[in-house]
Amino acid sequence: MPNTLVLPKNYVANLDEVYKLASVTSDLTCDATMVRAGANVGEVIYPQIDVTGLGDYDRNTGYTTGAVDLKWKTSKCNYDRGTKISVDVMDDQESEKLAFARGGAELMRTKVAPESDAFTFATIAAMEGISKLEGQDFTDAVQFLEALIDAKNKMDEDEVPEEGRILYATPTLLNGVMALDTTKSREILNCFSVKRKVPQSRFYTAIDLLSGKTGEEAGHYKKNATAKDINFMIIHKTAVMKYDKHVAHDIIPASMNADADADILKYRKYGLVDVYKNEWLDDCYQCLWIERG
């Protein structure tokens, strides 16, 4: 009888948890109930709501008539990535059942989460109309703190709600401001509902997704040749549509593998990153550092 890998029943749930802990942009994932299937393959639609403003009240005729304008925006899924990991039964047995179980966790932690984050930031950075500061090379935490104040002022003037703002910054910058430990620094940091440290390796204005095929067998992603490093980005969650339409991670035991005596983990993620509508682009604020070359 062929060997069969016995995995905990909650193995797939554990992989989901590893992803959530490793990803810094999981906060941006939207409520799936807000999204509908589009008319064409690969399309999704989601609502955009606008209302008319106040008018003069008349003591004889009463209120002016307002209206709610509900439209559905159509977007096309722009992310479709996956892989298949195979572990020989003997390799797994001789590693005390660690090769397969740990392999799935490492996939989530070192490949899936970083790539998802990098794709999210690069896609948002490429959107037209987002407020930007370019060419900022912060030499100390004080300069970064001043830039955060400028960013906060811009979002305040654009009437972006304070509640729900998420600050993404490189560990070097965020740790530096935290180390200042001044009243000013604490007050500014407290303005953000969530603060996330983003490794620079995930924080670029553009990336190349590697095919995993000839010449790019290792897969994953790399910084685009024309990309710039991002120092920090402030996003209000309601401005971004980050939607995973389909996430599949299937386990095929060796007993059901017709090609080899090996256990298989299949993973695929299909979805999109977009903004809700152009009027909300001021809800995203990013500061870019132009590399010196």
Image: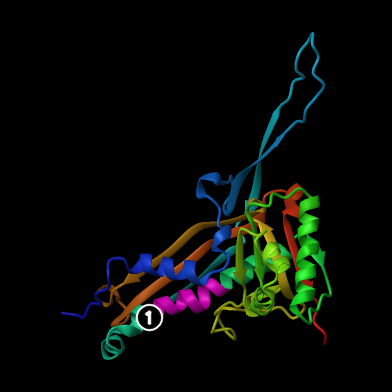
Instruction: Tell me if I can see residue 155 in this picture.
Output: yes
| Figure check: 115 above or below 153 | below
Q: Does the magenta stretch include residue 187?
A: no
Which residues, given as a range, are shown in magenta? Answer: 103-114
The kind of residue tagged 1 is Arg
In the figure, residue 133 lies in which quadrant? bottom right
In the figure, residue 106 lies in which quadrant? bottom left
Left/right placement of residue 182 relative to residue 4 reads: right
The one nearer the camera, 70 or 271, is: 70
Instruction: Tell me if I can see residue 271 in this picture.
Output: no
Location of the N terminus by quadrant is bottom left
| Figure check: 169 above or below 130 | below
The residue tagged 1 is 102
Answer few, some or many: residues within 10 Å of disc 1's Cα (few below 14, many 20 plus, some between 14 and 19): few
Q: Give the image location of residue 191, x and y in percent.
A: 67, 58
Q: Give the image location of residue 157, x and y in percent.
A: 81, 51
Residue lying at 40% horizontally and 67% vertically, measured from the top left: 249
